[in-house]
Amino acid sequence: MAETSFDVIVIGAGPAGYPCAIRAAQNKLKVACIDEWKNYDGSYAFGGTCLNAGCIPSKALLESSELYHRAQVEFAAHGIRAAGVEIDVATMQKRKAHIVKTSTQGITGLFKSAGVTALQGHGRLLAGHKVEYTAADGTKQELTAKHVVLASGSSPMELKSVPFDGKTVVDSWGALEFTEVPKRLGVIGAGVIGLELGSVWRRLGAEVVVLEAMEQFLFIADQQVAKEALKHFKKQGLDIRLGAKVSGAEHGKGGVTLHYADGAGEKSVTVDKVVVAVGRRPFTTGLLGTDTGIELDERGFIKVDHECRTGATNVWAVGDVVRGPMLAHKGKEEGVVVADLIAGLTAEVNYRTIPSVIYTAPEIAWVGQTEEQVKASGRPYKVGSFPFMASGRARAMEAPAGFAKVIAATDDDEILGVHVIGPMAGELIAEAVLAMEYSASTEDLQRTIHAHPTLSEALHEAALAADKRAIDFPNK
Ligand SMILES: Cc1cc2nc3c(=O)[nH]c(=O)nc-3n(C[C@H](O)[C@H](O)[C@H](O)COP(=O)(O)OP(=O)(O)OC[C@H]3O[C@@H](n4cnc5c(N)ncnc54)[C@H](O)[C@@H]3O)c2cc1C
């Protein structure tokens, strides 16, 4: 590499780092992006957790397994006879691997067309916003930059009592790589990742037990939504055990026995594979040299202000390695905003309108506050909801489960939160995000024309229902 001096060096090319590098280059800055991600076969790949081991491969498998499931349980209702439907796990995995590879190669292409210097290897921040770059062959070089952006992401948390062994006890990445459907699968953690992965293997035929330490199911979601979700997941055969604190694992000939305690005492369950999905922690191993001025908080996140500035001059940090929800789109927005701020432009992240999506069936999505949060805030509010059972499009799709719910302030009609559980919830929530971004009221949503018959009418009707003016469902 001839060039050693840059305007911006980004360490990490996940969904926070690579958009930052591209936007900085669009802003006419000289940019390098360093990434050390290696796949199981030892090959380097850009895209970080999201593209290689997270969002994209999980959605590929969710899609395949959902189609398989629907062919078995839903086609008959359409009059389609699909006897003898089989799953070929090798082909399913090959398709997933192809999607991942083309996506990660796409980033190499994007870097090239934007003029970003793409470096594969390790990056370490040194004092005075310098960076030590260690290439794949071990050669080291000191690079200088006017600004450095740290986007080193996160890694899965391990349970001391059930350590990963890469074969029987795996993390979320391992659970995306199974070559056959386990007969009995144990999932520790009923969070977003645990539920998505549990759903994949359940739909493909595994007996799935989900052990969750908390008594409350999906505490991050609106509790009306969580209750509805639990009902559907149980119906699908996910054996979700709440308040179940895992204390250890015993490996034997018959599988792995997980020991746990719940309100009723000590219990155990024996499974063939275990996925530990108890959360992720910020990843900063080997990232920081001495005297960089970067501070970590008590949980290991890099400390930043509201504009993602660290305590060190001209050093920024974005994505999973800083506070806030560990979501790809949150990191992307932070990365782009930081690239604009570096270029002297005006930009900010609106943390109030970051959507969350759980890609189960039914899908779950929300933006803004839950009803519990609004209630706790003391602000008077109104709620409107509309069931997909009353949506012509949802019924035509054979997907009548769930509802859309709009929570708004009674004083000025401001939309405070929107929650959807049902078909394409992750797509539907975009309208609510836009509405909240523009500080829309429920009246704005009510007066917006929604095409018929579409799923989006559920959101329209929920907004109308908030003022007891729904047309297609009785107002309560
Ligand atoms: C199974 C699963 C499913 C998920 N599904 C979704 C989803 O549907 N939607 C969603 O929004 N989020 C999802 N997530 C979360 C999402 O993947 C993360 O929020 C996102 O990847 C964070 O982006 P990031 O760029 O901050 O970090 P990462 O994606 O982790 O990328 C960080 C990169 O930096 C590299 N790096 C670290 N340190 C160094 C160093 N010193 N030198 C060089 N390179 C370094 C790493 O190798 C990595 O490539 C999922 C996660 C998992 C595990």
Image: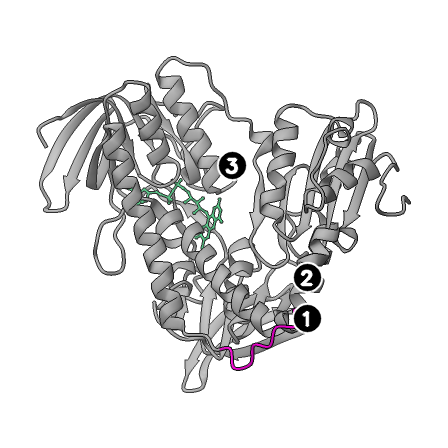
Q: Residue at x 52, y 40 (%)?
A: 325
Closest to the observer, 321 or 180:
180
Residue linked to disc 1? 77
Q: Is residue 174 left or right of residue 326?
A: left
Split into 4 quadrants, where in the image is the N terminus?
A: top left
Q: Measured from the top left, where is residue 160 in percent x and y?
A: 43, 62
Q: Is disc 1 in contact with disc 3, using a CB cutoff of under 8 Å?
A: no
Q: Is residue 362 left or right of residue 26?
A: right
Q: Measured from the top left, where is residue 247 in percent x and y?
A: 52, 68
Split into 4 quadrants, where in the image is the C terminus?
A: top right
Q: Is disc 1 in contact with disc 2, using a CB cutoff of under 8 Å?
A: yes
Number of numbered labels in the structure image:
3
Q: Residue furthest front?
A: 79
How crowded is the residue under tag 2: few (<14 C-alpha within 10 Å), some, or many (20+)? Answer: some
**Alpha carbon separation for disc pair 1 and 3:** 43 Å
Q: Measured from the top left, where is residue 342 in percent x and y?
A: 35, 18
Q: Please, is residue 214 above or below residue 326 in the view?
A: below
Nearer the observer: mark 1 or 3; the answer is 1
**Alpha carbon separation for disc pair 1 and 2:** 8 Å
Q: Amino acid at mark 2?
A: Glu
**Alpha carbon separation for disc pair 2 and 3:** 36 Å
Snapshot quadrant of residue 293: top left
Boundaries of the magenta span: 78-85
* Residue 361 seen in the figure: yes
Q: Residue furthest bottom?
A: 253
Residue linked to disc 2? 398
Instruction: Label 1: state its secondary structure.
Output: helix
How crowded is the residue under tag 3: few (<14 C-alpha within 10 Å), some, or many (20+)? Answer: some
Residue linked to disc 3? 324
